[in-house]
Image (cartoon, rainbow, N blue to C red):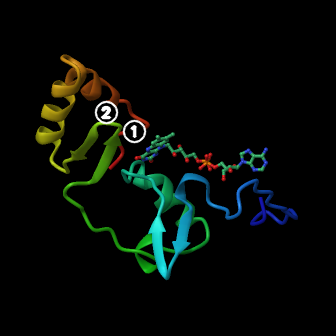
Amino acid sequence: MAKDGLEVTVLEKQPTPGGRARQLKEDGFTFDMGPSWYWMRDVFERYFASFGKKVEDYYTLERLDPSYRVYWESGFTDVPASYEAFREVLESWEPGAAKNWMLFWKKPHINTG
Ligand SMILES: Cc1cc2nc3c(=O)[nH]c(=O)nc-3n(C[C@H](O)[C@H](O)[C@H](O)COP(=O)(O)OP(=O)(O)OC[C@H]3O[C@@H](n4cnc5c(N)ncnc54)[C@H](O)[C@@H]3O)c2cc1C
């Protein structure tokens, strides 16, 4: 909207802006609070391109393995980067979940990169 010449005011109820993509700074460390997975990369690329910019001029992506860790009351689960390994984790949580994950992943708005 600002790009189209409108005056924009951003109102944020949290102490810092960014929503799920916000940063947490504490004790000299900076944490990215999300997203866990870099989905819909074309959305990021289109957004940067609309300002004549490129994503890679601002950040680089590094695949982490495990991708992230989910903490439960009774412990934690590492979420692996490999698609096949993740399917096994899903099946261990709930038989049939890997198939449903596949259906979700095939949705066109998700599987863009
Ligand atoms: C558990 C979880 C995991 C997810 N994992 C992924 C992932 O791995 N990859 C991915 O691409 N997407 C993921 N998503 C989806 C992604 O987080 C959302 O699609 C994305 O954050 C939406 O962006 P947004 O800017 O619309 O909303 P948000 O990022 O939610 O930002 C909304 C902002 O509005 C503020 N706000 C709310 N109400 C008010 C108010 N009344 N006044 C002022 N400010 C207000 C909030 O504090 C927040 O900062 C995940 C979502 C959840 C919940």
Above or below: residue 113 compared with residue 8: above
- Which numbered marker is on residue 7? none
Question: Looking at the picture, how far across and down is residue 25, in whole percent?
Answer: 54, 73
Q: In the picture provided, is 56 more to the left or to the right than 86?
A: right
Question: Looking at the picture, how far across and down is residue 4, in whole percent?
Answer: 78, 62
For the point 53% across and 74% down, the residue is: 26
Tell me if mark 2 has few (under 14), some (14-19) or many (20+) residues whose alpha carbon lies within 10 angstroms of its own: few
Q: Secondary structure at mark 2?
A: helix
Q: Which residue is mark 1?
A: 110
Amino acid type at image mark 2? Trp
Q: Residue furthest bottom?
A: 28
Whether residues under marks 1 and 2 lie with C-beta atoms below 8 angstroms apart, the answer is: yes
| Front residue of 27 and 21 | 27
Above or below: residue 17 compared with residue 103: below
Amino acid type at image mark 1? Ile
Question: Looking at the picture, how far across and down is residue 93, in whole percent?
Answer: 22, 26
| Front residue of 51 and 55 | 55
Q: Residue furthest front?
A: 74
| Front residue of 51 and 91 | 91
Tell me if mark 1 has few (under 14), some (14-19) or many (20+) residues whose alpha carbon lies within 10 angstroms of its own: few
Query: Which one is earlier in the sequence, the residue at label 1 or at label 2?
Result: 2
Quadrant in which residue 1 is drawn: bottom right
Quadrant in which residue 38 is drawn: bottom left
Q: Residue furthest top?
A: 96
Mark 2 C-beta to ligand 1 under 8 Å: no
For the point 12% across and 32% down, the residue is: 88
Q: Secondary structure at mark 1?
A: loop
Q: Which residue is mark 2?
A: 105
For the point 84% across and 62% down, the residue is: 8
Q: In the picture provided, is 21 more to the left or to the right than 81?
A: right
Q: In the picture provided, is 77 more to the left or to the right than 59?
A: left
